Image: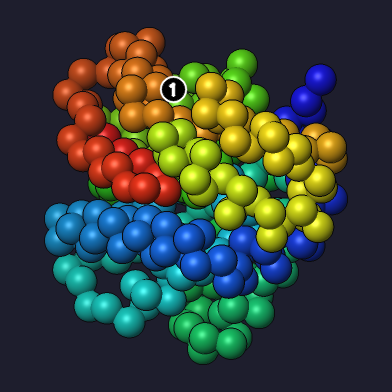
Amino acid sequence: MVNFYKNWDDLSIKYDRYVTQSKNVLLRSFIKREKRYLLSLIDENLQKKDVIVVEIGSGTGRLLFEIAEDESKKESPYRVRYLIGVDVSPMMTKMAKKKHQDFIGDKELSESWENKIKFCCENAILLNESIKQKKLNFNNATIIVVCVLNTLGIIDPNERSQVVQQMIKLVGTDGKLFISVFNAESFKKNAFVIYKPMTDMIGPIDERQIFDENSPDVKSQSGYYSHWFNETEIINLITDSLKKTNTTGKQLTHVNVSDIGIIVQIL
């Protein structure tokens, strides 16, 4: 039986080397595309009010640090009020907090940025409860909840819908939801290219399984698991979650499908 979260503490140190600092051309191109879409969404909303970004599965903080570095150089009518990372792994969270201090010094950002970036260790099925405990000022700000780089695919399938519902509840009526996952239609072509360089991190993988298009799941001997989604599957998951949360006024406004991934925005 797969333990979906148990081994992430063990993977945390290697995670930086194989993901955050990845030289894999395919993975890097997808990361750049995610960032381009997300920064555009943030900048668009900064024209109207302050923005709060909450990332689900923030790992060691890569994306939030990149947003902070980018946004600190811009002048907008409003500001990024908080960048909040939520991750289930205590070790990942500990590393993110350590990197946070180094990041502020290395980039010579103002003291305000040190207070804007927050990391917490929590299962995302408790997202709203966890965020409320932070007692941060969410008034009159646009909340953008982010779940990127197929984080949704490594979440326990039995909890996946609950996590999406938690994200939808957190964005509320005025917020935005940004999700990106790996595209199952390219599983046969791209999965081995992405995961083969990571076997030192995730453990040996069954090459025969990688080429099974009928089961777009990666499972390694270490317990690592990652599911790839087709377009219909991810749209149905989000649409069903919108219905379960009785959310009105929210809809899928943008679905971008590429060879490697699918980017979904809910506005």
The three-letter amino acid code for the residue at tag 1 is Gln
Residue at (21, 18) in percent of width and height: 248
Q: Residue 98: x and y, percent?
A: 72, 69
| Position in image of residue 95 (x %, y %) | 73, 63
Q: Looking at the image, which is closer to me, 111 or 209?
A: 209
Query: In this orientation, does residue 146 appear?
Result: no
**Picture coordinates of residue 133, whole percent (x, y):** 58, 38
Residue 28 visible in rendering: yes
In the rendered image of this protein, does residue 213 appear above or below residue 103? above
**Closer to the camera, 83 or 258?**
258
- The answer to whether 130 appears left or right of 187 in the picture is right
Label total for image: 1
Q: Nearer the viewer, residue 50 or 201?
A: 201
Q: Where is mark 1, residue-wise?
A: 165
- Which residue corresponds to the image point at 60% horizontal and 68% vertical from the top-left? 22
Instruction: Identify the residue shown where x is 52% and y is 86%.
Output: 107
Neighbor class of circle 1 (other Cα within 10 Å; few <14, some 14-19, many 20+) is many
| The quarter of the displayed image where residue 167 is located | top left
Instruction: Determine whether the residue tagged by mark 1 lies in a helix, strand or loop.
Output: helix
Indicate the quadrant containing the C terminus: top left, top right, bottom left or bottom right. Answer: top left
Could you tell me which quadrant the N terminus lies in?
A: top right
